[in-house]
Image (spheres, coloured by chain):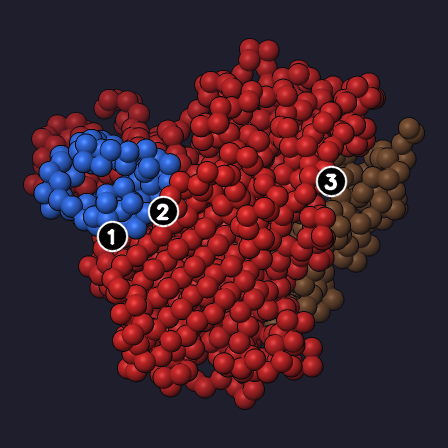
Chain colours: A blue, B brown, C red
Amino acid sequence: MAQVHFSSNQRRLTGGVAEIEIEAATVRELMRKLEEMYPGIRAHLDQTSATAVAIDGDIIPDPMYEPVPPDAEVHLITPLAGG
Amino acid sequence: MSRTHVSCNINGDDVEFLCDAGESLLDALRDEMRLMGAKEGCGTGDCGACSILMDGRLQCSCLIFAPEADGAAIVTVEGIADGDHLHPLQQCFLEGAALQCGVCTPGFLVAAKALLDRNPDPTETEVRYALAGNLCRCTGYDKIIRSVLAAADRMKEEVAG
Amino acid sequence: MTITEQRPSYRYVGTRPVRHDGLDKVVGKARYAADLVLPGMLYGHILRSPHAHARIVDIDTSVAEAMPGVRAVITGADFPDLPADDPERNMTRNLMARDKVLYEGHAVAAVAAATRRQARDAAEAIEVTYEVLPHTLDILEAMEPGAPLLHDDILTTGLDSEPSEPSNVANRTCYERGDIEQGFASADVVVEGEFLTKPIHQGYIEPHACVADTGQDGKTVIWCSSQGHFRVRSQTAAMLGWDTSRIKVIPAEIGGGFGGKTTIYLEPLAVELSARAGRPVKMVMSRDEVFRATGPTPGSVIRVKLGATGDGRITAAKAWLAYESGAFPGVWAMLGCMCVVSPYNVENFLIEGFEVVVNKPVNAAYRAPSAPMAAFATDTLVDEIARRLDMDPIDLRLLNCPSAGDQAPYGPKWPLIGLRECLEAIRDSEHYRSAPAAGHGRGVASGFWFNIGEASSATVNLNENGTATVVTGSPDIGGSRASMALMAAEELGIDVHAIQPVVGDTEVVGFTDVTEGSRATFATGMAVVEACRDLKGQLRGRAARMWDCDVEDVEWADGRATHSGGEHEPLALADITAEAGRTGGPLGATASLNARGAGPAFSVQVTDVSVDDETGRVTVERYTTAQDAGTAIHPDYVEGQMQGGVVQGIGWALNEEYIHDADGVMENPGFLDYRIPVASDLPMIETIIVEVPNPNHPYGVRGVGEVGIVPPLPALANAIHDATDARIRELPMSPPRVLAAINSGNGA
């Protein structure tokens, strides 16, 4: 089960839940399950530009097809910019 | 509009060109002579990227009207090397990694040459003040200053050698 | 000086060869975009808004169009109006105003004419009727209800409840952990302050420039100065409404970028002018235009409160950050939130950030964007804690230092990082171990930057004479070509100067993201290594054919094939390439990848300053920077990045700022009044390369381009305090501000 962590902004959509466990093979599946649990969260993530995920510390900017290893730690964050 | 005829010597070659009266020497070098070494970083004499030697004096070519060059001897970065033999400053800039993007480099080389021509044994402080009219945003100047000092040493050795 | 952890010994990686593109740059032959001349070429010129905020009522181009030499005139109406949800919409509206101008310098129209003067004169003859609107320049004022609105469709995201009215606040970001009430309750020392910074410019010496040549076949070729020509292609296509396959972008040498050339300003205008005129069009900005119309880094208001126990452990942090993004929103406040306490392990924090639009030029990335302002606040307050507790500031930082497995404030766990090693390197440096000279003040600070990976492509071709050509899609802004050649030399076992590193255009190399986020040597280097490893497999196969043996019996090491049974004389790479035509054809390999695992970057710096108490002028007397490079591929250019970053930070800390008058007109758009550091302002910048190899890169590379700019702001503020007792919380710490602080005796 992957551990998904929600930022303070995102907790507004999760009813205050900061962390949940989800069984998902890919980020796409994880997002689908998140949307079932918290309707509107995908729109919120898009709207707040939180379109990247960090999986076990590795930030992936465009992650939909990314595999989610069992017991991965997942954060939903903004893709980074840089100079 | 009639154009002004200018005769001068650039990097050892006697040349003639036509320019507008209000044209800068920098534009004339680039547009009329196709010498692209001198760069325009500001057009107001603040950055030194267009530095040239005119009758031995260091000048910002963006601040000189092209007709003023009539009869003058001009050296640009293209004229610093002796044929295929690089000037010690050019060699030391390469070996000392004194350039990153390279756009300020022509100006620095000309300004450093002007310094070493009149002061072959400058201190670090003298190099820093002599190059204070040349802006570099990449290097923090450290490797430029070291390379100019190294070139001065090399030139002294060549003279002594 | 280099601290080298145990690592494999390399033959080329870690050496300092002369860079391959160096010779052209010292003899004046390197070709930048402004140096290109094409037959029949016209010159473009942009008309810009004199107002900070105004409605465009009418644009009359008829006089301009009839002027001598004029071949084309364009305005915003000549480009498609992208829908509101298009991610490039703001970019297109920045390049050419529609309906409203949002800052002084905003482009309104453009002209192509036979000479520069004709183009400028015609642009000035375009008659624009404006209805001037109230403007807002100050972040806090712009956040207030009732402030003049730049856009009527910005509804703040990230608030607890959806706002019903538009505002200038694009978003609120929040990061929270633990219980900050309890964290502060357990603190023995609490420090807090409000920190102010102004927009500053990247200040690359080469102004933006491009040439576009649009043909009758509807295709165009662009030569330009850019950190990423594939993004030039996609953004130009978006603005023109074209398919990207109609656009070829050829990267010229780039005269500095630092983040400011990660977006476009001129290219679609030049393409459109060229299409209308049927001739190539060159556009080159003046320095004045660069300042007024291209991306500065945001000004900011940052309030931080820190609590620590008596033995120096930080227990709580509260941070409120507002970043001004110029006329369109960016991601700057969000990045600031993610950096503000990152060099510290803090169990309890609440970080809140606001992205605010104002009537100033649209911000662009600048070297570790948003991190320096955040570090200015936090690392100044950490210094105050150290003083209150009478602790060494390095020891305090070591006590609170995160390492692999600790939870970073922005969410994920830290991978292997080298902050501790950088702190120790400064602590153990000759500089730190010797006392500052009499009258000098000393300051230290640390800085963090993420670094990024992204997409890169490389093609490596072996030539018949045993040399190699390495083609990548990463514009070289600081010596990356030399790094690519070094990694290829290490892999192939041939001399670094037998390798020609080339930056390929959009049609000769695979897609490659922008040179940004300190990614080129990391990510593109990874693609080069992968292509070389593919080639080594091919070389073994060719040797097997030449020897008529099994490929399993061929080993490749040190640039040559050896037979495991010793039955054949080893074959050098050149021996194999000479026979390539007879053993299967030319040898080449391509690798394209999405690089993962960019190692985060940290830098720790110490500086000694003197302060003239009559003028307030600060002189940097000594400066040492330690930075984790993972592995330094070309140490000269790692040092160059470190030194360049530090000096940009010194300029930011001491001199640089955008100054606008009450009408929103920039008052210092030139290098005389916007003063970047010059050689006589500075000492040598001593460097300590720390190497904690990044396990995700074949040679352990971490990006080195950005983090160096982060610590100088607080390091200098702390040093000035040490010298004068004045605690300055507003940048720049220019002579009048320092003098006022000394005279007001605002010691802390």
Type of amino acid under label 2: Asp
As drawn, is C64 to the left or to the right of C682? Answer: right
Asked whether residue C210 appears in the rendered view, the answer is no
Q: Chain of mark 1?
A: C
Q: Position of residue C562 (x, y in %)?
A: 16, 41
Please tell me if label 3 and label 2 are on a single chain.
yes
Residue lying at the far top in this picture: please name it: C217
Question: Spatial distance from mark 3 to mark 2, Cα to Cα?
Answer: 39 Å
Q: Chain of mark 3?
A: C
Please tell me if label 3 and label 1 are on a single chain.
yes
**Label 2 SS:** loop
Question: Spatial distance from mark 2 to mark 1, Cα to Cα?
Answer: 24 Å
Type of amino acid under label 3: Pro
Residue that label 1 marks: C412
Looking at the image, do the residues carrying marks 2 and 1 touch, with CB atoms under 8 Å apart?
no
Residue that label 3 marks: C50
Please tell me if label 2 and label 1 are on a single chain.
yes
Number of residues whose C-alpha sits closer than 10 Å to that of mark 1, classed few (under 14), some (14–19) or many (20 or more): many
**Label 3 SS:** loop
Number of residues whose C-alpha sits closer than 10 Å to that of mark 2, classed few (under 14), some (14–19) or many (20 or more): few
Q: Earlier in the sequence, mark 3 or mark 1?
A: 3
Q: Nearer the viewer, residue C601 or C252?
A: C601
Q: In which quarter of the view is residue B92 placed?
A: bottom right
Which mark is drawn over residue A42? none
Q: Position of residue C629 (x, y in %)?
A: 35, 58
Q: Nearer the viewer, residue A52 or C693?
A: A52
Type of amino acid under label 1: Pro
Q: Residue at x 59, y 83 (%)?
A: C745
Looking at the image, do the residues carrying marks 3 and 1 touch, with CB atoms under 8 Å apart?
no
Location of residue C559 with respect to C55 vertically, above or below: below
Q: Earlier in the sequence, mark 2 or mark 1?
A: 2
Which mark is drawn over residue C160? 2
